[in-house]
Amino acid sequence: MSDLQQKVAQKYGAFGARPDDEEIDRKVLADNFFKPTMQLIAGIFAATLFASFASSPKFSAPGAWANSFRLDTALVVVWGPLLYWVMARQRVWKSLRIYLVLALFIEPFSEAMFKDMGVVASGEAGYWDTVMWPAAVAFFGTVKEFAGVPGASLSVFFFTTVGLLYRAVKGKKADTWTPPPKFARRALLTFLFTVIGLAAFGIIRGGAVEPAFRQTIYLIQLPLVGLLFLYALRIPEDLASVGTAFVCAAIARSLLVMYIYFGVCAPAGITALPGKPEWCTNQSDSVLFVVSLMVLLAHSLEQRSKKVIVRSLMLAAPILLGIVLNNRRLAFVSLAAAPLVIYLALRPSKRKRRVTWALAFSVPLLVGYVLVGSEMASASPIFKPAKLVLSVMDQKDNSSLSRDIENENLIYTLRASPLGIVTTGFGHEYQNSPDNPPVDIGELFKNYKYIAHNGVLWMWSLAGVVGFTLLWMIYPLGATLALRGYRAAQTPLERSGALVALGSVVICVIQIWGDQGFNSYMTLVTFGVSFAVSSRLAARGG
């Protein structure tokens, strides 16, 4: 009887009187974790800036990181105990918030820019040594890359995730805590065990162990991150802090993009070259930038106050500029697709009619901008979005042509298996189609035949129909749960959280399809958060 009373009180308030929606949102928004988030970002940046000046990256050869002890490695005596304290000694919900800020702001080491990280002879080296590299190698790099420990091929991020997950599952729970939905847990565990099974199957069939490890290390971490947020994220208490983390991290990294563009690339004459720079920070920032814009969009749609709309527009401005200067086509694809899906999900209302009229007015203007701006000979950043959008539709540049060849090779590999049901499993390369010219980009991407850009076709070619279905189902499931959570949401903040989760799933799928999204920490963290929010909101609706 007491358990039933607790559940009733949690949903409807004490004595069956549910608090006012505005009061609930007001309390959650007041606990947005803004000040600690900004302090974390400023502290991380100051520390990594100091370490980047005190130490220097080491390479064993052009494009090959030297796994050795450096001066920045010694700084673990400072940040190691601090990380342990915030992840193991604080309350789980607070540790989770800090974990999310770290994961969003610190760039993945595999995507960090270095002058000597590319193939210098081919002109593919980076524009500068990013000042974020000490934090990147410390948090996302493997222990071998960070400290030169032989065979230590897992990252601090991995161990932090596992430790927090253990605390979330086995630790003491608050009285108001509710177990995560069984269907969500089962979906993530199915993903995890399918990856492990496909890796074992591929190795038994003669696959190489090291490539199998490289193919699966991110995939294994995806359900672990998802389970962590599923167990530890509190709904609705943590919704505002999640949005704050995305927006603050996006603005901070947008400022970094601006510095690289105007402070590094422009003085070197790089910005005057057609299509340059290829990017300023990394490809995964596209996910962060667009998701943060969806946070601001959904918040404005649901709160519907002039103050919120004006503030959201002001916060969106630097993020939009960061997207333009970072020069990644997929960002603009996501920026078109995610709002469209959110618009379609909106309930029929006066507000949706207003949005429809706004779209009817703005779409012709955007089309005209693309048609005119794409033809301009100027290298000004103003016309970069138009040229990138046209290049997505045109698909005639070298990058698009090489991706087409790679996709045809993946399809050929799938067709080589009996009915496409049973394929090779992990640890194997894709096969070259005899209809395509041989393309060798091993100089630029060592594992290019093991990890393809198009994650959907790549996964299908390795896992077959059955394996792909077991792995891919969490994405449509996440979107379905987000839509159901939106319909069942009880407050404007919950509705905006569900809409952002829905848009985030779309953004992650686009990143997986277009640019190795399966092998991106940003994508797996974003999806993990979105899946947890969707599942919790859907379960609250019954």
Image: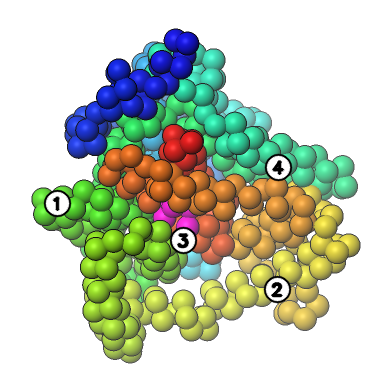
Distance of mark 3 from mark 2, alpha carbons?
A: 28 Å
From the image, state whether disc 1 or disc 2 is nearer to you: 1
Q: CA distance from mark 1 to mark 4?
A: 46 Å
Query: Tag on residue 305?
Result: 1
Q: Secondary structure at mark 4?
A: helix
Magenta span main SS? helix
Evaluate if marks 1 and 2 touch, with contact meaning CB atoms under 8 Å apart: no
Disc 2: CA contacts within 10 A as few (<14), some (14-19) or many (>=20):
some
- The label nearer to you, 4 versus 2, is 4
Judging by the rendered image, the residue that carries numbered circle 2 is 408
Label 3 is placed on what type of residue? Answer: Ala
Q: Amino acid at mark 1?
A: Ser
Q: Nearer the viewer, residue 428 or 33?
A: 33
* x and y, in percent, of residue 207 in the image: 82, 48
Chain-order first, disc 4 or disc 2: 4
Range shown magenta: 501-506
- Name the mark on residue 195: 4
Identify the residue under disc 3.
125
Looking at the picture, how far across and down is residue 400, in whole percent?
55, 76
N-terminal label among 4 and 3: 3
* Sequence-wise first label, 1 or 3: 3
Between 286 and 239, the residue placed more toward the observer is 239
**Sequence order check: which comes first, mark 3 or mark 2?**
3
Q: Residue at x 77, y 44 (%)?
A: 198
